Amino acid sequence: MKTTIENTTLWLSDAEITHFCGKSLTASLYELPLTILLTGELGAGKTTFLNGFSEALGILDYLPSPTFALENVYETDLGVPLTHIDLYRLENPSDAAAFLHSTDSHSGIRCVEWAQRLSHEFTEPHIRITLADTHTKEGRGVTVSFRDIALPSESDIAMWQQEVALPKHIVAHCAAVAELAVTLGQHLITQGRIIRLTALKRAGLVHDLLRFIDFTPGAAHVEEHGDTPTVWEPYRKTYAGMKHEPACASFLREKGFDALATIVEAHGLLLPPASRRTIEQKLLYYADKRVKLDTVVTLDERFADFRERYGSDTERIKDAEVWLRQARELETELFQDSVPA
């Protein structure tokens, strides 16, 4: 399936933030093997960025620019190698392309400095990091171009919502979660964190697509909707025994959207907190717990509403106490004492 192009632009005020930005990229990796292309002139911060990236992957050694050695290989905490390549000395585009091609069989992460040496467009799934040195002490700009995963369009998601006859209040909830998640992501971007805002928004819009699978007859959240039981029945049979989170993830994987499935499946309590490895997973989980129907509220307000509606259901309240605790932990991890929304 064709990958979706998504661009994120950040301002990095100094080397420390550049290093931090590199570290943050490791929290937005979804599919391996992966090629990361780095473009920028001498002194733009490519090696600083890469050292942040490698440090977050558990590589203790400092990564020198491999200008004097075209290729270095390191082991990572992910259990796959990181191959560090520098094309600076290969000024002939054909030589640069040939050398890079010789490493195509890599099984992990391939980081390529001086990717501008390649004269042809790189068509394989990849992430491109473009660092622009302003030649001032004020910092540098970086553009992160994601071309490594496929995403459905917003019109695709709207069509799916119609096909499954998703109740209007759930559609509104998904839209509110998506908007809040993006707002939170934009705040983190100003701190030097790399966030896939497009993927995050699509995850918010689709995360409760099959919410009706969890509905029980007579429950307050079930809408009377004409032919809805007929429309829902095939999905209930297909995903029998599943809750709505893994069911939606399976639905997305069947359509070729594996990365989006990874983001969506972790927004409930079926998976342990450690499974929320990526920043997009964390933001979706947190934003979902901040939205009551289609209104943004505090975590305490959301829990109070939940207790009011389900106070007699001991198991539901126990689950709510778990998601409240986990959401508070995420709030502290992501925003410390300054929650932006």
Image (cartoon, helix red, strand yellow):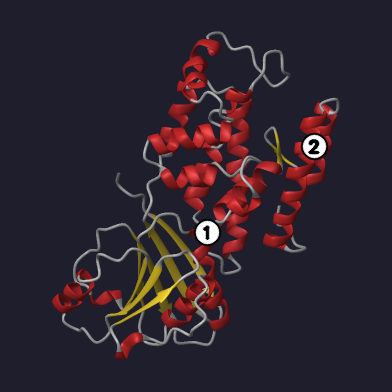
Residue 296 locus on image (x, y percent): 71, 42
Identified by mark 1, the residue type is Ile
Report, in whole angstroms, how far the alpha carbon at label 2 lies from the one at label 1: 32 Å
Question: Which of the two labelled residues, at mark 2 and mark 1, occupies the earlier sequence position?
Answer: 1
Q: Residue at x 30, y 66 (%)?
A: 106
Task: Say if residue 130 shows up in the picture.
Answer: yes
Q: Residue at x 49, y 27 (%)?
A: 161
**In this view, 53 is above or below 321:** below
Judging from the image, what secondary structure is the residue with disc 1 in? loop
Give the residue at mark 1. Answer: 195
Residue 286 locus on image (x, y percent): 67, 48
Residue 230 locus on image (x, y percent): 50, 10
Q: Residue furthest bottom?
A: 68
Q: Say few, some or many: other residues with alpha carbon within 10 Å of mark 2 (under 14 / 14 to 19 / 20 or more).
A: few
Identified by mark 2, the residue type is Lys
Q: Quadrant of residue 82?
A: bottom left
Give the residue at mark 2. Answer: 318
Q: Quadrant of residue 302?
A: top right
Q: Residue furthest left?
A: 94
